Amino acid sequence: MASSPTVLMRLMASAYSVARRAETIVRNVMAGGDLGIVEKCGPNDLQTKADRLVQMSICSSLARKFPRVTIIGEEDLPSHDVDEELIEDGQCEEILKKAFPPQYSSIKEEELVVWVDPLDGTKEYTEGLLDHVTVLIGIAYEGKAIAGVINQPFYNYEAGADAVLGRTIWGVLGLGAFGFQLKEVPAGKHIITTTRSHSSKLVNDCISAMNPDSVVRVGGAGNKIIQLIEGKASAYVFASPGCKKWDTCAPEAILHAVGGKLTDIHGNPFHYNKEVKHMNSAGVLAALKNFDYYASRVPESVKQALVP
């Protein structure tokens, strides 16, 4: 093992602890009863007090420790002093003990971009569909998603009083992914996971072309990738603009770390360098296995309608 942790190791260890702090904030806001909901661009594009506090917590905590890392968050918030109670200074010792791939050992702080979705599945959060909700912290290097953290604040929330509430999944390309049990959908089954609140004719046409055995409609990109890696769905199909880079960076890194694939609907990889446009305007296609099967079934009419 290296004598001192690399920048990526330290950033991942901090991101893990920051995500755990975010989990507490998300649950506390829900317990307090006043979600502080505001509409951003309409009734399906909401922001809550939890979105605002978590983004301040994640971005400020990481910026203090890693001042040269570029951090891009979903919420457009005014810059002001952040309450010290929101700052998380800890780091996950388990991550620091891992043997990270040697190709990451010389990465400099200023070469990393962090994409933050403080509350993925905000609409579901406001509706009490709490298992859909995740906190996403993705890390990119040279435009590629290489590491990510997905926290589920309400994991096990219906499992009874003795269950441990919340969990944190993390992964690094070339190292693997941790915090869950990797499972595949039974062979020959085609189960599609897709949007719950942003459906359209295009979305449904694309799903129909996959000839699925069943369709699971849930909120949140992070939640959909968890469906793939835990064997509840075989492909994530979203033939529509709407998803953003902070929605896909962390989930993509974790999916790729276990051998899956996530692209736009044309099969083009996403780029996560700091200058890119935030919208994933050509939709999302992802699978743990058999990606080419799903990619080959995307209709030409869908591809023509979705321009990268």
Image (cartoon, rainbow, N blue to C red):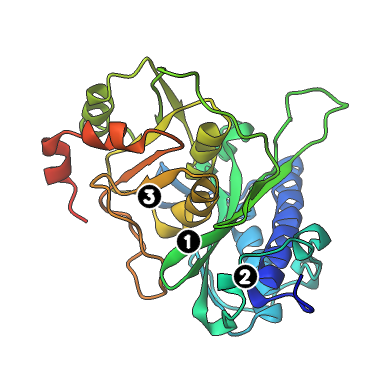
Q: Residues within 10 Å of mark 2 (few under 14, many from 20)?
A: many
Residue at the spot x=39%, y=47% of the render?
262
Foreground residue, 148 or 124? 148
Q: Nearer the viewer, residue 217 or 149?
A: 149
User: Which of the 4 image quadrants contains residue 275?
Assistant: bottom left
Left or right: residue 288 versus residue 64 is left
Q: Which mark is residue 145?
A: 1
Secondary structure under tag 3 reads: loop
Q: Disc 2 designates what residue?
A: 59
> The disc labelled 1 sits on which kind of residue?
Ala
The location of residue 203, given as percent across then percent down, is: 27, 33
Up-down: is 72 above or below 249?
below
Element at badge 2?
Answer: helix
Amino acid type, label 3: Cys
* Residue tagged 3: 243
**Label 2 amino acid?**
Cys
Q: Is residue 295 visible?
A: yes
Pick the front one: 224 or 86: 224
Q: Give the alpha-carbon distance from disc 2 to disc 1, as whole Å.
A: 18 Å
Which tag, 1 or 3, sits closer to the chain's start? Answer: 1
Above or below residue 65? Residue 231 is above
Q: Is residue 160 left or right of residue 123?
A: right
Which quadrant of the figure has residue 300? top left
| Picture coordinates of residue 216, whole percent (x, y) | 44, 23
In the image, taking residue 135 as reference, residue 261 lies left or right, namely left
Q: Residue furthest right?
A: 162
Q: Measure the C-alpha gap from mark 3 to mark 2.
A: 21 Å
